[in-house]
Amino acid sequence: TDGGERAGLTFIPAAELEETEDAFKLRVELPGLTAKDVTVEVTPEAVSITGERKSETTTEREGYTRSEFRYGKFQRVIPLPSTVKNQEVKAEYKDGILRLNLPKTEAEKQRAVKVNLG
């Protein structure tokens, strides 16, 4: 069994990677988190997203207040199909969705050449 580091991880966020001619567009669902709960690191080959979910519910009944805190750490590493300019990544976080625009390196852009047939 995998009882080491992963034991403390509560969920793995869903991710979607789309490729365009010049960039990769990555969307990651991070419901219930604020931007300060999330750390994003980008290398030329991968994106690493780590964070912590903190939620609290309070119920009052018969004069007693019960408070429940739910904490959970997560980490997701998404390998990229080709190298990107990790210094030029643009990020946006809105309504629980993290969007990253990961521009491809010039060498990667030139690797695929379209051939015009007549």
Image (cartoon, rainbow, N blue to C red):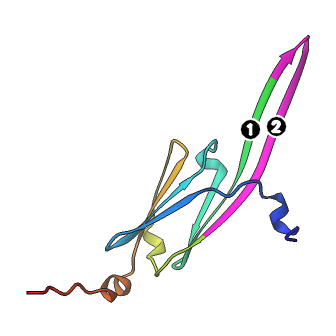
Instruction: Say which amino acid is labelled 2.
Output: Phe
- Horizontal and vertical percent for residue 27? 49, 57
Q: Extreme top residue here?
A: 62
The stretch drawn in magenta includes residue 25? no
Cα distance, mark 2 to mark 1? 6 Å
Q: Is residue 2 above or below residue 107?
A: above
Identify the residue at horizontal 55%, vertical 45% (top origin). 96
Question: In the rendered view, does 54 fall on the left or right side of 62?
Answer: left
Badge 2 element: strand
Quarter of the image for the N terminus: give it: bottom right
In-front residue for pair 4/89: 4
Instruction: Say which amino acid is labelled 1.
Output: Ser
Identify the residue at horizontal 68%, vertical 58% (top origin). 12
Badge 1 element: strand
- Horizontal and vertical percent for residue 91? 47, 57
Q: Are marks 2 and 1 in contact (CB under 8 Å)?
A: yes
In-front residue for pair 36/57: 57
Residue span colored magenta:
59-77
- The residue pinned by badge 1 equals 55
- Horizontal and vertical percent for residue 15? 55, 60
Quarter of the image for the C terminus: give it: bottom left
Question: In the rendered view, does 108 fall on the left or right side of 33?
Answer: left
Identify the residue at horizontal 14%, vertical 85% (top origin). 116
- The residue pinned by badge 2 equals 69
